[in-house]
Image: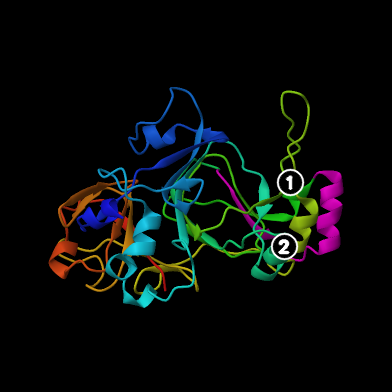
Amino acid sequence: MPATAALPLGPILFKPIYQGRIWGGRRLASVLGRELPGRYEPIGESWEVSDREEAMSLVRGDGATSLHELWMTRRAEVFGEALVGHPSPRFPLLMKILDACDDLSIQVHPPVGVAAELGGEPKTEMWFVAHADPGAKIYAGLREGVKRVDFEEALRTGKVADVVHALLPKSGDCLFIPSGRIHAIGAGLLIYEIQQNSDTTYRVFDWNRTDANGKPRQLHIEQSLRSIDFTDFEPRMARPTADGTVAKCEFFDVRESTLSPGGAAGESGESLTIAVTRGTLRCGDVALSAGDFCLIPACLATENRRIDGCSADSHWLEIRIP
């Protein structure tokens, strides 16, 4: 493909894909300085790195080359020899920023075996809390001792929130959400989400809300009950390990970093994505600020991966495919 062949390889930025959501807001503009579509439309999600057929990331400044083309035609060069044999026909991760100005539905993503039976896609994900209003909540896992029969009774009485574990996050917290873990993002949170490339979500409870016509939102009770892990109780926020790791599984490896100037983003021969969560920095010849996701191609030499120009508060995530 000519457009892909002509693309010079340095650190790669993609155009964000904005998704309107009824629970969204405008903090991508007020907190991250984005220019959002419309004047008042609530934007709930910005898909930053996406190889979805319905929402495809295009290289910023190029306009024609897609993430999918890079994955299919320049995999060794961009993503490294270690991923040449990866079985996924699409880039296997989806990276987003979520702006929740209202509570999202309590939901679950199906585990592998169940997803296949239900015709969906499994999804394991992790969250990094970039901003949290005072009192904002994350819901994840069940309260200790809650059994399936208790959960089903809560469904019948509209009290599901009473049996789901609630956490009070602060900026900088991280949480791992494996497939099967019941969860919801509460109002007042700006979250970076790293997930499998999947868009299957089963809503089990929507806070007894109704629309303007008095009708409740569609739920997926049967699918949810088959997907929820009823042995998953009261998970905790992740604590970084010595090397900064905050989430590591077979799908992704996410580490926090505040390297001193002169360090490098990975080693020549490996690919990773930098997600800037705070402050500013430069990687090679590319200036980055909070909210930017930058793909570092495997072919870049160490000198072109240098991290320089860091502000005093600079902080970022390094995201790798194992």
Judged from the image, the secondary structure of the residue bearing numbered disc 1 is strand
x 23%, y 63%: residue: 259
Name the amino acid, label 1: Phe
x 37%, y 55%: residue: 67
- Label 2 environment density (alpha carbons within 10 Å; few <14, some 14–19, many ≥20): many
Q: Is residue 154 magenta?
A: yes
Quadrant of the image for the C terminus? bottom left
Judge whether 46 appears above or below 120 on screen.
above
x 42%, y 29%: residue: 37
Q: Nearer the viewer, mark 2 or mark 1?
A: 2
Residue 183, position as x, y percentages in the image: 63, 54
Q: Residue 227, labelled with which disc?
A: 2
Judged from the image, the secondary structure of the residue bearing numbered disc 2 is helix
What residue range appears in magenta? 136-158
- Looking at the image, tell me whether mark 2 or mark 1 is earlier in sequence order: 1
User: Can you tell which quarter of the image residue 72 is in?
Assistant: bottom left
Q: Residue 205, labelled with which disc?
A: 1
x 58%, y 35%: residue: 23
Judge whether 211 appears above or below 268 on screen.
above
Q: Is residue 302 magenta?
A: no
